[in-house]
């Protein structure tokens, strides 16, 4: 129990969000819209979502070109496996899972691929914030009475500072790699135990190599543009699923919902973003005049439609022995002290052993 405290903390946070999401609703309030929904609208929604995943795979291929050119066709299954890992394991373990699988299949250093994955997430966060700030007038309705936990305006401002700050750091590190490496070495020597110095320095060098694609403004703009396309396609899925239910809001409202929901899912929660996805989604819709029971039914179906297809696809692709071994390793190490460092070091040790064979 003590060892898995992070998992149980996530479950507790999910329960709090679910409490606010479902407060004042009876089972019949949600069941009625579920009974009458036109579920065939999910089919084009799922199709568009898989196109968005393919664009994600292209973006990852684009980011990794300076490290190693790998086709989008090769990247797509690994991206799907990563989604599956994020959906069924806590703490977004799927991101580490896809980095390790890419190492095994394409011999790309784990630290370099993790750098590109972090860059992806930073650009995703910036786009999500753009979606939110495009709809600033609508934020006035996002109060606790609509079911949202906390102050969305403050969350958006703090999120803007965090993501834009991270983006500035990565761009600076990409443009001035030698100086960035010196700064990191200075920090490592003062913070990290001496026995890890050499290994952390090796990780740092490869990590900075993964930022190479940001050295050109044109490259950075291409990554940003691709990120916008990805999230607009995902919003199109929200739009298709909306047509399965008897309500209609503007596409901009769905962009706001998409932005807030995905920012909220950065909060630790139970696997699958239970609660942290649902509460803000319901809140956005109720603040825009949708009955709470109907909003809850729509958000539930949308959540399932986002979770099940990509999780099933991710489970279909890998060799079972490979995925089981890696997933068990990541799940076992995730709760240990110094979990991220130890996981990366283990992957690097494995890389060293493979070289020696």
Image (cartoon, helix red, strand yellow):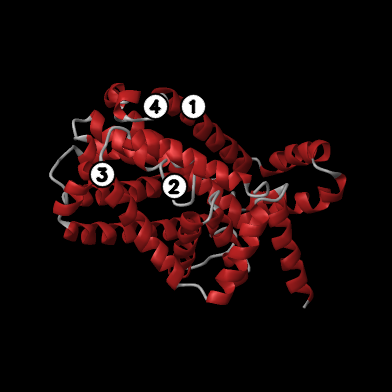
The answer for how far apart the CA atoms under marks 3 and 2 are is: 21 Å
Q: Which quadrant of the structure image shows residue 356?
A: bottom right
Q: CA distance from mark 4 to mark 3?
A: 28 Å
Residue 315 shown left or right of residue 118 in the figure? left
Which one is in front, 182 or 313?
A: 313
Percent x, y for residue 169? 59, 36
Q: Is residue 301 visible?
A: yes
Which of the two discs, 3 and 2, sits closer to the camera?
3
Looking at this rendering, what residue extends furthest in the bottom direction?
357
At which x and y percent is residue 327? 58, 64
Q: Which mark is residue 152?
A: 4
Residue position marked by numbered label 1 in the rendering: 158
Residue 27 numbered tag: 3
Name the spot of residue 57 as percent of width and height, x first: 44, 60
Give the mark nearest the N terminus, 3 or 2.
3
Mark 3–mark 1 Cα distance, whole angstroms, equals 36 Å
Q: Nearer the viewer, mark 2 or mark 4?
A: 2
Residue 261 coordinates in the image, percent (x, y): 37, 40
Q: Nearer the viewer, residue 206 or 193?
A: 193
- Distance, label 2 to label 4, CA atoms, is 18 Å
Q: Please tell me how crowded label 2 is: few (under 14), some (14-19), or many (20+) other residues with Cα within 10 Å.
A: many
**Real-space CA distance between mark 1 and mark 4, rounded to the nearest whole angstrom:** 10 Å
**Label 2: which residue?**
273
Would you say the residues marked 1 and 4 are in contact, meaning their CB atoms lie under 8 Å apart?
A: no
Q: Earlier in the sequence, mark 4 or mark 3?
A: 3
Identify the residue at horizontal 36%, vertical 37% (top origin).
279
């Amino acid at each position: 129990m003590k060892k898995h405290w992070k998992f149980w903390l996530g479950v507790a946070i999910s329960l709090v969000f679910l409490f606010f999401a479902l407060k004042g609703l009876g089972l019949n309030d949600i069941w009625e819209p579920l009974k009458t929904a036109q579920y065939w609208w999910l089919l084009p929604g799922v199709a568009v979502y898989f196109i968005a995943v393919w664009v994600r795979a292209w973006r990852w291929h684009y980011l990794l070109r300076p490290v190693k050119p790998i086709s989008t066709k090769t990247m797509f299954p690994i991206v799907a496996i990563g989604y599956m890992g994020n959906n069924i394991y806590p703490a977004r373990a799927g991101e580490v899972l896809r980095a390790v699988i890419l190492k095994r299949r394409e011999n790309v250093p784990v630290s370099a691929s993790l750098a590109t994955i972090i860059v992806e997430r930073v650009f995703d966060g910036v786009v999500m914030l753009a979606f939110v700030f495009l709809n600033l007038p609508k934020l006035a309705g996002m109060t606790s009475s609509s079911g949202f936990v906390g102050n969305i305006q403050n969350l958006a401002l703090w999120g803007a500072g965090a993501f834009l700050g991270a983006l500035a750091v990565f761009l600076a590190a990409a443009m001035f790699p030698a100086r960035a490496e010196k700064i990191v070495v200075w920090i490592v020597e003062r913070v990290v135990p001496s026995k890890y110095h050499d290994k952390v320095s090796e990780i740092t060098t490869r990590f900075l190599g993964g930022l190479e694609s940001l050295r050109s403004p044109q490259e950075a703009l291409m990554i940003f543009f691709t990120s916008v396309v990805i999230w607009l396609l995902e919003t199109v899925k929200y739009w298709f699923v909306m047509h399965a239910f008897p309500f209609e809001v503007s596409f901009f409202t769905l962009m706001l919902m998409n932005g807030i929901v995905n920012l909220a899912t950065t909060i630790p929660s139970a696997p699958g973003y239970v609660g942290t996805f649902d509460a803000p989604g319901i809140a956005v819709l109720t603040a825009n005049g949708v009955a709470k029971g109907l909003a809850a039914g729509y958000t539930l179906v949308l959540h399932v439609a986002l979770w099940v297809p990509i999780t099933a696809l991710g489970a279909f692709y890998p060799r079972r022995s490979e995925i089981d071994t890696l997933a068990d390793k990541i799940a076992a190490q995730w709760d240990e002290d110094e979990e991220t460092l130890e996981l990366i070091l283990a992957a690097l040790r494995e890389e060293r052993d493979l070289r020696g064979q």
